[in-house]
């Protein structure tokens, strides 16, 4: 009984082996012998994307810090223009690193300290007049970071002269601006130091696929960023898809307005797409998914091509919301909703199809197979 | 009743297998409870969430707030009492009730081996496992029995056999055997394991694992029953379950099965094991004279009928999916409580929309504001949970002033490597759909076929 069953099994396995061998030469890609190399992927991310990204951001942040100091020392329309320009450049650069909210950035809640909007203008004004505030409190989240700087540099008074006058006449204002800047500098400094220290090795050596692995953390952070902070935060919430009424004042960089809000969004979108594709010939999410042969089994089209097509459509729809996102949401909100919908299609490909194909675990709790 | 059957129901075995099983099982459940507690899951799964997914007919089973800790403590205490055999039957009943209550509190934590633990605990209430090598029997020697009817031991073996065979039958489908799904997705993700890692990236290995897994599940109970193959079969039990423990995050399941499979070993083996334990704990020698447990005819009849009903239900329940017209893996109608383990890589995303019945104003729901990561993950691929959440949203928004809220869900699900597709009809108002066991016509077609059982 046992013998005959065993031989039947062996026979079946052999047959299958032959079948699968026959298929390979006809297919476009030959399965790699040992499967994807996660450590190489993590190394590439750490050394070619995350660390250089943080380095460039650090440069912009340092400039912003010195321009802020120059402005608070001598508030003039000229120094205001310079600090604004530095703020804008750093804000754009921030869009290229905000998605790395894992490891050191997650530990200090970097995003909470840098880019939760809309800014709480009333709270900021209270802080300025009281002179006592703690940026670690959850109520203080929208009273700091880039959105706070947006309010402090663009919205605290009407007209550049009035803004300059405000800072020239009020030490409390100068102090708050300096403190916001110092908090950003200090928080980012922790993250930057860790990536340049031991965390890089910790990151690339944690090469499994369980819920605490680097890959799982990156994928969770990546899809969460695209879904919640890009799709919903930058477009969905201002367009009113969550609440039923457009809320154009909820856009990023609201006090600055003009073409900046859309530039921030398109930069973020391009970053997400660039992170997916990596550099030609180097390990990336794209090459990993191709290596595990992820495809639509109904049509045979590769998952990476489907994702890139959708990213393309979504990026195009997003760029059509220009030049002024605030004006677009006010006058032709349907386009913003359409842009949200295209991003939603990409969210599904990332959150469902890609995560499933990567086989990363998202929860720590036991699971016996979905 | 045939003569053979008659003889069978009157034959006796030493009580040792029931005693070791009781002891090992009690300790394992205790370890599960301690592990669950230590990992902070009581708070994370039963205290923090704002909403829980009850089972049909058990909507009244709810977490008890901070008293939930007490419930787990009670469960752990009953497990200890079962293990040492003190107030045995009350403890077994307490274990069954507390453990089952815990499992019924939220569907999103459903695991097949929790169901298995509940069933074993129920059997232990009926079986005379507290009459030998127990505190009860040493405190009250007149209750001690060292021989029990053979069928009381065989009942546990039969349950094990059902679990394995049904798990094997569930693997006889085209995704598992022809496409090596989902192992083909899961195994390459483990290719950095020492020794076996490099193999796991290869497609033929996924096929080998799939086919061996199906063969193993279908046959291992029979090899365990046979005296000549038993040792080898148990060795494969250990290898198989250790391998699954290494590869997949399935918690206590491998250990539960490894320990439970010991019930197939002969009574003499169990007696030797208990003797060794007695020496280790410096307990007195077992009394040599035979003391068989003889049920009164009425009691015996009642027990046998009870067990008969239990096993008929066990054999039938996994096939209830045949009452539903469409693909089981897609609709999951009749999926739970059927020993379908590790069969699907299923992932989904769902966007709920709530529309005010009076003004027509629509708003989208952030699931994470209401559900935990685990709950959202489980809900997004299981239609019955989607309805339950939709009803919760209906009541939630009605309380916040939305008039006769309509709830629509735009769900997207991928199954075993197929590209995701729309899962349920986004035009159906789920607020008005009833949550029951009837087929759900608003689940959209699967547009593919999985053949087999």
Image: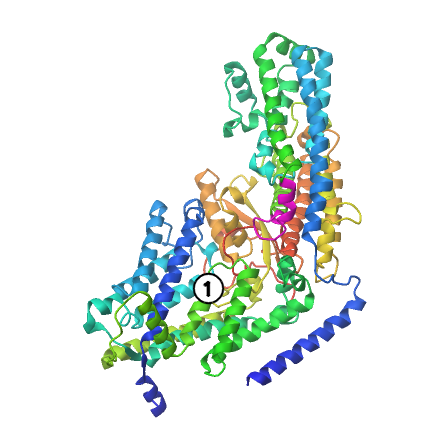
Residue B261, image quadrant: bottom left
Task: Give the answer, above or below, for where B174 lies relative to A184.
Answer: below
| Residue at 52%, 18% in the rendered image | A126
Residue B341 can be seen, yes or no = no
The foreground one among A99 and B57 is: A99
| Residue at 33%, 60% in the rendered image | B79
Residue B205 position within the rendered picture, expressed as x and y whole percent measured from the top left: 66, 68
Chain ID at mark 1:
B
Residue A93 position within the rendered picture, expressed as x and y whole percent measured from the top left: 71, 31
The foreground one among B390 and A148 is: A148
For label 1, the crowd category at 10 Å Cα-Cα, with few meaning under 14, some 14 to 19 and many 20 or more, is: some
Residue A246 position within the rendered picture, expressed as x and y whole percent measured from the top left: 61, 33
Image check: B113 left or right of A34? left
Task: Give the answer, above or below, for where B221 lies relative to B279.
Answer: below
**Is residue A213 located in the magenta-colored stretch of the structure?**
yes
Image check: A1 left or right of B313? right
Residue A70 can be seen, yes or no = yes
Image check: B392 left or right of A166? left
Tell me which segment is drawn in magenta.
A199-216
**Is residue A49 located in the magenta-colored stretch of the structure?**
no
The foreground one among B119 and B411 is: B119
Q: Quadrant of the N terminus of chain B?
A: bottom left
SS class, disc 1: helix
Q: Quadrant of the C terminus of chain B?
A: bottom right
Q: Which residue is mark 1?
A: B255
| Residue at 35%, 63% in the rendered image | B26
| Residue at 37%, 51% in the rendered image | B62
The foreground one among B158 and B254 is: B254
Residue B78 position within the rendered picture, expressed as x and y whole percent measured from the top left: 31, 59
Residue A50, image quadrant: top right
């Amino acid at each position: 009984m046992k013998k005959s069953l065993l031989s039947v099994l062996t026979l079946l396995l052999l047959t299958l082996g032959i079948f699968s061998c026959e298929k390979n030469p006809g297919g476009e890609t030959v399965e790699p012998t040992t499967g994807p190399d996660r450590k190489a992927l993590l190394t590439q991310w750490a050394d070619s994307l995350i660390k250089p990204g943080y380095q460039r951001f650090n440069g912009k942040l340092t400039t912003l810090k010195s321009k802020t100091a120059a402005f608070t020392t001598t508030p003039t329309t000229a120094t205001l223009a310079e600090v604004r320009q530095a703020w804008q450049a750093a804000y754009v650069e921030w869009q290229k690193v905000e998605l790395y909210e894992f490891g050191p950035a997650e530990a200090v809640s970097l995003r909470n300290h840098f880019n939760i909007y809309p800014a709480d203008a009333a709270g900021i004004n209270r802080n300025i007049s009281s002179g006592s505030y703690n940026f670690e409190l959850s109520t203080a989240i929208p009273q700091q970071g880039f959105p706070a700087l947006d309010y402090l540099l663009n919205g605290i008074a009407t007209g550049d002269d009035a803004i300059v006058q405000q800072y020239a006449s009020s030490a409390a204002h100068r102090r708050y601006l300096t403190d916001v800047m110092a908090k950003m500098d200090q928080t980012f400094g922790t993250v930057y130091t860790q990536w340049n220290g031991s965390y890089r090795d910790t990151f690339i050596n944690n090469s499994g696929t369980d819920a605490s692995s680097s890959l799982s953390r990156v994928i969770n952070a990546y899809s969460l960023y695209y879904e919640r902070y890009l799709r919903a935060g930058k477009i969905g919430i201002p367009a009113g898809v969550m609440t039923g009424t457009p809320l154009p004042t909820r856009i990023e960089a609201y006090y600055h307005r003009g073409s900046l809000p859309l530039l921030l969004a398109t930069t973020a979108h391009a970053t997400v797409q660039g992170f997916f594709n990596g550099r030609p010939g180097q390990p990336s999410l794209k090459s990993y998914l191709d290596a595990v042969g992820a495809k639509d089994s109904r049509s045979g089209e590769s998952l990476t091509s489907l994702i890139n097509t959708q990213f393309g459509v979504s990026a195009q729809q997003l760029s059509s919301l220009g030049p002024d996102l605030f004006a677009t949401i006010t006058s032709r909100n349907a386009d913003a909703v359409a842009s949200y919908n295209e991003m939603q299609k990409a969210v599904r490909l990332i959150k469902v199809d890609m995560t499933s194909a990567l086989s990363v675990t998202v929860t720590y709790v036991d699971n016996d197979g979905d | 009743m045939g003569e053979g059957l008659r003889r069978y129901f009157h034959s006796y075995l030493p009580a040792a297998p029931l005693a070791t099983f009781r002891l090992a099982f009690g300790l394992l459940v205790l370890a599960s409870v301690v592990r669950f507690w230590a990992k902070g899951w009581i708070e994370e799964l039963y205290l923090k969430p704002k909403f829980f997914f009850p089972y049909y007919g058990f909507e009244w089973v709810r977490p008890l707030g901070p008293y939930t800790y007490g419930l787990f403590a009670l469960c752990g205490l009953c497990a200890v009492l079962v293990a040492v055999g003190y107030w045995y039957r009350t403890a077994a009943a307490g274990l069954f009730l507390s453990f089952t209550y815990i499992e019924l509190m939220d569907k999103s934590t459903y695991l097949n081996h929790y169901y298995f633990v509940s069933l074993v605990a129920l059997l232990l209430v009926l079986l005379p496992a507290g009459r030998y090598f127990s505190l009860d029997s040493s405190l009250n020697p007149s209750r001690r029995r060292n021989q029990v009817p053979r069928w009381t031991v065989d009942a546990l073996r039969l349950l094990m056999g059902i679990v394995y065979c049904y798990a094997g039958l569930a693997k006889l489908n085209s995704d598992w055997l022809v496409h090596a799904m989902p192992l083909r997705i899961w195994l390459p993700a483990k290719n950095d394991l020492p020794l076996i890692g490099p193999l796991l990236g290869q497609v033929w290995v996924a096929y080998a694992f799939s086919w061996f897994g199906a063969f193993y599940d279908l046959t291992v109970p029979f090899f365990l029953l046979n005296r000549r193959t038993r040792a080898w079969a148990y060795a494969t039990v250990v290898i198989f379950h250790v391998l699954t423990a290494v590869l997949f995050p399935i918690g206590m399941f491998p250990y539960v099965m490894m320990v439970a499979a010991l019930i197939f070993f002969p009574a003499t083996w169990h007696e030797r094991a208990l003797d060794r334990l007695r020496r280790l704990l410096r307990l007195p020698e077992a009394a040599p004279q035979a003391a068989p447990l003889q049920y009164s005819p009425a009691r015996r009849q009642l027990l046998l009928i009870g067990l008969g009903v239990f096993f008929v239900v066990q054999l039938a329940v996994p096939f209830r999916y045949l009452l539903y017209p469409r693909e089981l893996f897609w609709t999951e109608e009749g999926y739970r409580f059927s020993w379908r383990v590790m069969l699907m890589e299923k992932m989904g995303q769902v966007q709920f929309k709530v529309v005010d019945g009076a003004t027509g104003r629509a708003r989208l729901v952030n699931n994470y504001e209401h559900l935990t990561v685990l709950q959202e993950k489980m809900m997004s691929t299981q239609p019955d949970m989607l309805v339950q959440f939709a009803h919760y949203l209906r009541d939630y928004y009605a309380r916040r002033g939305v008039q006769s809220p309509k709830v629509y869900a735009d769900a997207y699900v991928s199954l075993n490597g197929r590209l995701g597709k729309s899962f349920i009809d986004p035009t159906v108002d789920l607020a008005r759909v009833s949550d029951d066991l009837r087929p759900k016509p608003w689940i959209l077609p699967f547009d593919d076929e999985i053949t087999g059982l």
